Image (cartoon, rainbow, N blue to C red):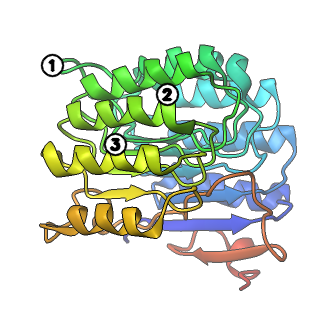
Amino acid sequence: MLPGSIQMSGETLSSAEVKGVCEGLAEGTVRLLSLRGCHLSDRDFARLCQGVSESPSLVQLNLNLGVVSSTGRVQQLAQCLHRNRSLQSLFLHGNPLTDTGLSLLNPALAGHPALMSLDLGDCLLGDEAISLICGLLPPDGAKQGLRELTLSANPGISCTGWARLAIAVAHSSQVRTLNLDYNPLGDHIASMLAVCVASSRTLEVLDLEGTGLSNQSAQILLDMVQNYPTPLKSLVLSENNISLELQQQIADLLSEGEDEEESEGHGQERPVREKGLKSNVGSGPHRVLLTSGIGDCLLAETEM
């Protein structure tokens, strides 16, 4: 039986439902678990973490929008990540981690053998967190690091913090996608990022939507794309004070030679990435899909 997925949004989970999820995790029948904006007791969260730690099949874990709501839950998540060996993608967007919470998670993140994608958007991070994140982006020749990093909507990060990140990305042999949307970067930081992109041998996607850029930044980025060959395929510049003409020129240049297949995520189901500021969970609770028969209580209540 092929591993399946559980995707729920905005629900309050009962102990019976959490038990069903944990059984599926332990049996290796769950590949993707998404509990976006869901509510569960501290006891059930601890049980869920135990299930994640024991899962041989879980590849993607989405706990976005307030699921990891306390220091105690951060510590429990860190403990389960120390034991888990299968996870490749971790989504924690919209949780109040702060620098303190990330410092608790960092040893588990740094020591995980398979983690490639990390979403820490809207997590109230600052410069201390950036220093830790840079450690997850080892330089050329070092161990495997992150390939996809999301830091959307973390306005507490200073110019110095962004400069440190740009240096780390420029020297990383792994990073392919960098999402910095809805941070107050401005033209100065964008100029540093242009140097970062020009230096990187792997960066394919850079999201700068809503980051306070002007035509000055766009012109620098255009010059970079025109004159310095890079792997960059997508540069998101919407919701900035940039002319449509400049945006189109950059897009046209990047679209040349876009015939290659996506190198990541082939055949995998992914949660939709949160964009910008913490969004509402939606019009109401919903469940996308539950496969592989991991609990009658969940299957019987599947909703659209």
- Residue 216 locus on image (x, y percent): 44, 44
Describe the element under mark 1 as helix, strand or loop: loop
Camera-side mark, 3 or 1: 3
The residues bearing labels 3 and 1 have C-alpha atoms spaced at a distance of 30 Å
Write down the residue under mark 2.
83
Query: Dot 2: within a 10 Å radius of its alpha carbon, few (fewer than 14), some, or many (20 or more) residues?
Result: some
Q: Where is 249 relative to 114, above or below?
A: below
Q: What label sits on residue 103 in the rendered view?
A: none
Mark 3: amino acid: Ile
Q: Sequence-wise, which precedes: disc 3 or disc 2?
A: 2
Residue 225 horizontal/vertical position (percent): 22, 50
Amino acid of disc 2: Arg
Residue 99, image quadrant: top right
Q: Residues within 10 Å of mark 1 (few under 14, many from 20)?
A: few
Secondary structure at badge 3 equals helix
Q: Give the residue at mark 3.
A: 220
Say which quarter of the image contains residue 197: top left
Question: Left or right: 202 with respect to 37?
Answer: left
Residue 270 is at least partly visible in this image: yes
Tell me the distance, in whole angstroms, between the alpha carbons under discs 3 and 2. Answer: 45 Å
